[in-house]
Amino acid sequence: MTGPINRLKRRKVMRLLSSVLFLLVWISSCQNSPESASASKLPKGPDHQYLDKLHRVDSNKVLLSDGCIVLRTGNDVISSMFAQLNKTDKTFSHCGIAFRENNRWMVYHSIGGEDNPDEKLRLDTYEQFVRPDHNLGFGICRYNLNPAQIEKLHQIVLDFHHRQIPFDMEFDLATDQRLYCAEMIYKAFHQALAPDTLFEVTQHKAFRYVSTDNIFVNKDAHLLCRIVY
């Protein structure tokens, strides 16, 4: 059974790579990533270096509040490609929404690829989401929402997760049956704050999409930290 399972994982990864490559060509915005696209692992070093990274994860946890957006910079090729879809700030490649549940900070996020073979919307702890062995850094962004808006946002994200909405390989903003990471946040906030939304949509010719920097680069966003491991 191992062979067919591995082949299925490889097909899903190649499908995701093909989708992102298509988008990069389509929007004609390829630039060099600030980090090496070939980096698959953080360089090995003394234990104290890794402990320092874990300390930064823990010390910045105090910045979290319900409804905060947690961003990260993955250290793999697909993450580097996703970062290239950003128009103004190519720092972050992925994003999710944080809520405190059962005395732990949890992050809801939509992701595809080998790390999430069933492609369903995921729920990870904050520590797992920004773990330094899989990422080059992370950030936390907050919007000024009132308690009613935060509660509505939480219920919307809980519903997304309950329905196990899969990752959108086509990056089609017009459909709601599948959601990619920035699209999930964009649509959750749009529903919670309807009829207004805080985020702009990137338009390139006939193609419309929400990039990660659409989520944290605007006048209403408060980027509380930008950590580089």
Image (cartoon, rainbow, N blue to C red):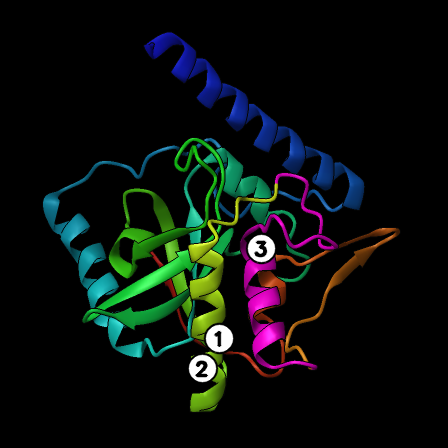
- For label 1, the SS is helix
Residue extending farthest right? 205
Crowd class of label 2 (few under 14; some 14 to 19; many from 20; radius 10 Å): many
* Residue 22 on the magenta segment: no
Residue under the image location 74 percent in, 60 percent down: 202
10 relative position to 60: left or right: right
Amino acid on which the number 2 mark rests in the picture: Ile
Q: Nearer the viewer, residue 124 or 228?
A: 124
Q: Nearer the viewer, mark 1 or mark 3?
A: 1
* Residue 12 x %, y %: 52, 26
Residue under the image location 53 percent in, 54 percent down: 181
Screen quadrant of the N terminus = top left
Precedes in sequence: disc 1 or disc 3: 3
Precedes in sequence: disc 3 or disc 2: 3
Amino acid on which the number 3 mark rests in the picture: Lys
- For label 3, the SS is loop
- Badge number at residue 153: 1
Q: Which residue is mark 3?
A: 90
Amino acid on which the number 1 mark rests in the picture: Leu
Question: Do residues under tags 2 and 1 come within 8 Å of each other at their CB atoms?
Answer: yes
- For label 2, the SS is helix
- Badge number at residue 150: 2
Q: Can you say whether 107 is above or below 170 in the image?
A: below
* Residue 150 x %, y %: 45, 82
C-alpha span from label 3 to label 2:
28 Å
Residue stretch rendered in magenta on the structure: 169-195
* Residue 155 x %, y %: 44, 72
